[in-house]
Image (spheres, helix red, strand yellow):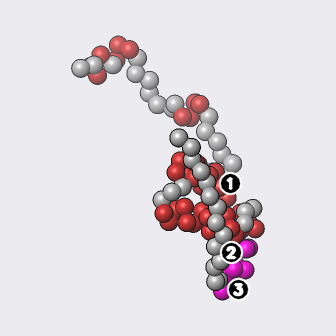
Amino acid sequence: MRTYHVRVNVTLSIDEKLLARARALAHERGTSVNQLVRDYLERLTGTSGPAGVMEQLERLWSEQPGRSGGWKWNREEVYDRPVLHRHERTRLRG
């Protein structure tokens, strides 16, 4: 089964100030107003699919600085909990 992608041109009537803000936002995100509109329409219609979701996550990860202050987990801290030895888990078996 083949999938064909057809592109069409659409003319929009947009207020100049709105277009200027959209261009600034697109510039900040390193994309185009065209792509912003395409992304919006995909989200609006629910057609972004898994690839679109990953693109959105990657964009969010690159845009958001996070709040860790540079701190990173290490293995000891992740597993900092009492260890149950095999003989202590017998009551957990059904």
Quarter of the image with the C terminus is top left
* Foreground label between 3 and 1: 3
Q: What element carries label 3?
A: helix
Mark 1 or 2, nearer chain start: 2
Residue occupying the far left of the picture:
94
The magenta stretch is 15-25
Q: Is residue 18 magenta?
A: yes
Q: Is residue 21 magenta?
A: yes
- Measure how far apart labels 3 and 1 are at the Cα level: 29 Å
Residue pictured at 64% horizontal, 73% vertical:
10
Residue position for label 3: 16
Q: Residues within 10 Å of mark 2 (few under 14, many from 20)?
A: some
Q: What element carries label 2?
A: helix
Q: Residue 62 carries which label?
A: 1
Mark 3 or 1, nearer chain start: 3
Q: Residue 22 carries which label?
A: 2
Q: Percent position (x, y) of residue 8?
A: 64, 66
- Measure how far apart labels 3 and 2 are at the Cα level: 10 Å
The amino acid type found where label 2 is placed reads: Ala
* Foreground label between 1 and 2: 2
Q: What element carries label 1?
A: helix
The amino acid type found where label 1 is placed reads: Ser
For the question of whether residue 66 can be seen, the reply is no
The amino acid type found where label 3 is placed reads: Glu
Location of residue 31 with respect to 14 vertically, above or below: above
Residue 82, quarter of the rendered image: top left
Q: Percent position (x, y) of residue 24?
A: 73, 73
